[in-house]
């Protein structure tokens, strides 16, 4: 039996977002772009605004600056290590940042900052699982799947003071 996923693309104050939920309504992906064409090409993805309504509403509230925490069921698909990293990302409070090294230390392996970075980069549920809150050890912004401009925009929305590098 093949799985069907439901998605919608919608405009927010930070730009277009794409939310994807599974058949149970759990969020499995959030992209900081219009990903409709890519999802439709994969097959098994159906555009359905009603199925994604709760995620869409909460993401719009976040982008408007009126929501600081999400109340959604999440079902990211990843390895055990990736899921451990993604769990730690959810522990970073709104308006705060952590470094890859800090996350590696929390996970019990201070030498795993690169592995944490890889897991962070494969996070399928951006914004809700706040990978944008992870920065380099120097305090500067580092890679983000949605681009550094989007990462900067999300951190500024949350009131994070950024270095004057950009």
Image (cartoon, rainbow, N blue to C red):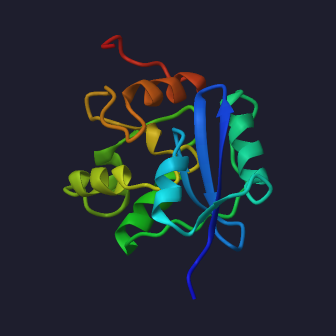
- The image shows residue 14, relative to residue 104, as above or below, that is above
Position of the N terminus, as image quadrant, is bottom right
Where residue 121 appears, as percent x and y from the top left, is: 35, 50
Where residue 120 appears, as percent x and y from the top left, is: 37, 51
- Residue at left 51%, top 56%? 39
Inspect this view and state whether residue 24 appears. Answer: yes
* In this rendering, position of residue 47 left or right of residue 113: right
Q: Nearer the viewer, residue 75 or 16?
A: 16
Position of the C terminus, as image quadrant, is top left
- Residue at left 47%, top 56%? 124
Counting every numbered tag in the picture gives 0
- Residue at left 28%, top 47%? 101
Where residue 68 appears, as percent x and y from the top left, is: 69, 38
Give the quarter of the image for residue 112.
bottom left
Q: Nearer the viewer, residue 148 or 68?
A: 148
Residue at the limit of the structure toward the bottom, as seen here: 1
Residue at the limit of the structure toward the top, as seen here: 164
Where residue 100 appears, as percent x and y from the top left, is: 31, 46
Inspect this view and state whether residue 68 appears. Answer: no
* In this rendering, position of residue 31 left or right of residue 137: right
* In this rendering, position of residue 140 left or right of residue 88: left
Q: Nearer the viewer, residue 156 or 106?
A: 156
Q: Nearer the viewer, residue 54 or 5?
A: 5
- Residue at left 51%, top 38%? 33
- The image shows residue 44, relative to residue 7, as above or below, that is below
């Amino acid at each position: 039996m093949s799985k069907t996923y439901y998605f919608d693309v919608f405009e927010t104050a930070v730009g277009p977002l794409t939310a994807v939920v599974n058949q149970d309504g759990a969020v499995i992906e959030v992209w900081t772009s219009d990903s409709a064409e890519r999802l439709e090409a994969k097959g098994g993805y159906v555009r359905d605004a009603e199925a994604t309504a709760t995620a869409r509403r909460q993401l719009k509230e976040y982008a408007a600056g009126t929501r600081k925490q999400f109340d959604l069921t999440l079902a990211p698909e990843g390895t055990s290590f990736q899921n451990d990293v993604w769990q730690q990302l959810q522990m970073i409070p709104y308006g705060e940042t952590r470094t890859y090294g800090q996350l590696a230390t929390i996970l019990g392996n201070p030498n795993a900052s690169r592995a944490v970075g890889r897991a962070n980069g494969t996070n399928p549920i951006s914004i809700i699982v706040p990978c944008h809150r992870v920065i380099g050890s120097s305090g500067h912004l580092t890679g983000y799947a949605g681009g550094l401009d989007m990462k900067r925009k999300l951190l500024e929305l949350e009131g994070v003071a950024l270095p004057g590098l950009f």
